[in-house]
Image: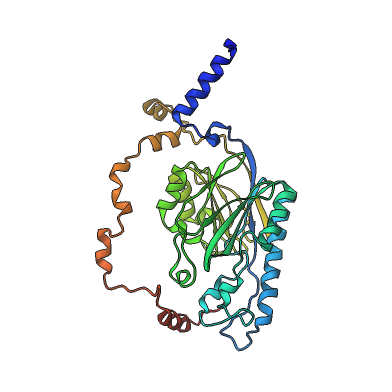
Amino acid sequence: MPRSFMPMLLLAALLAAVGVDRADAQARRAAKVAVIQAEGSPRQDPFMASYDFSKVEPMMEAHLDKILGLFAQAGEKGADMVCGPEDIQHIGAYGLHLDVLNPKTGEDLFSSLAVKVPGPLTDRIAGIAKKYHMYIVAPLYEKVDGKVFNSAVVFDREGKIIGKHHKTVLPILETWDVAPGDEYEVFETDFCKFAIATCWEIIFPEISAIYALKGADIIFNPTMGPEHKAGQSLSTGARYITRARDNLVYFAPVILGSDGNGIIDYNGKVVAEAVGQKNSVIMAEIDFAKEPTSDSKWWNTINGSDNDRAIYYLNRRPETYKLLTDPNPPVLERYRDVELTTGRKAKQLEAVKAVNYGP
């Protein structure tokens, strides 16, 4: 064997020995990351006398056309990756109409509108991803073996589905007809690692922490509900800022509405937003090779590093966090008498009618 090969073999053996994975061995780099800001669309309300089933699917298709048009617009702007809001079909509210059926299929209305993956809808999205050579995160309701999941489907630059995230923590009303997922996936691109925390998953800090510990550089939060008041900057969304700062990751809320979407960096600074702009694409160029560092000479000398992420994670005490995985922590003693509506259809119907919920 030529002696010139020996250093290369030794390096390869060393990397294998310390468990360096492919994504961390490759250089992270700058890329254009986009989120779309789409307004909600009209939909039918089964509680109203004017309800017309024949309009349900056309309204859904009109909303999908708008979302997919914004994906394409992101591609035209040169985005390397784009994420849409939760429920791009705009059918989530139908999940509350538990006794309303689809006359075509006999299924409950909501479940009948969920899609299979892959299928015609994901084929359309795949075509956009391939045409513009960009990654797409498409949150949608998916039908799997008789169950419905709140999914986020991930497409690579060639339009191939490379993974899905099933929302793990569901609001009570969503548990009525949606199944929870059980995994926290981190997806690899050719410029970073990213994760998806759908809607309510942002409420639970453990989820974002898991993603950060798995190496996510950016967490997308596709959702139907903002954490701040309409018309205000993302900087007023305390939970968004906290998730970014606590985990030293980029954080990108993607809300259905005319504001509230954007990108926050690991210091909690808003780097892109478009307050009040309807049906638009928000984009920022992010250098994922840049680590969060401190410019304090004192701090850096004391700690032996200027890399804040390294300092924080090397200083963890996981052996002291066991209570976080206890299904019956002491605080639940306070709530022995609380009975939620999960799994109780009669109570669910009663609750929905009591609040006169409509789209």
Question: How is the rendered protein coloured?
Answer: rainbow
Total marks in image: 0
Vertical order, 136 against 24 (above or below): below
* Spot occupied by residue 134 in the image (x, y as percentages of width and height): 68, 47
Query: Seen from this angle, which residue lies furthest top?
Result: 3
In the shown orientation, is residue 130 left or right of residue 205? right
* Spot occupied by residue 281 in the image (x, y as percentages of width and height): 67, 55
In the shown orientation, is residue 264 left or right of residue 51? left
Vertical order, 21 against 346 (above or below): above
Figure quadrant of residue 29: top right
* Spot occupied by residue 335 in the image (x, y as percentages of width and height): 28, 68
From where the camera sits, is residue 128 visible?
Answer: yes
From where the camera sits, is residue 77 visible?
Answer: no
Q: Nearer the viewer, residue 201 or 346?
A: 346
Q: Which quadrant, please, contains the C terminus?
A: bottom right
At horizontal 24% and vertical 65% (from top left) the residue drawn is 333
Query: Seen from this angle, which residue lies furthest front?
Result: 1
Q: Which quadrant, please, contains the N terminus?
A: top right
At horizontal 41% and vertical 53% (from top left) the residue drawn is 205
Vertical order, 21 against 37 (above or below): above
In the shown orientation, is residue 258 left or right of residue 308? right
At horizontal 49% and vertical 59% (from top left) the residue drawn is 167
In the shown orientation, is residue 216 left or right of residue 140? left
At horizontal 66% and vertical 59% (from top left) the residue drawn is 122
* Spot occupied by residue 270 in the image (x, y as percentages of width and height): 56, 48
Figure quadrant of residue 188: top right
Figure quadrant of residue 83: bottom right
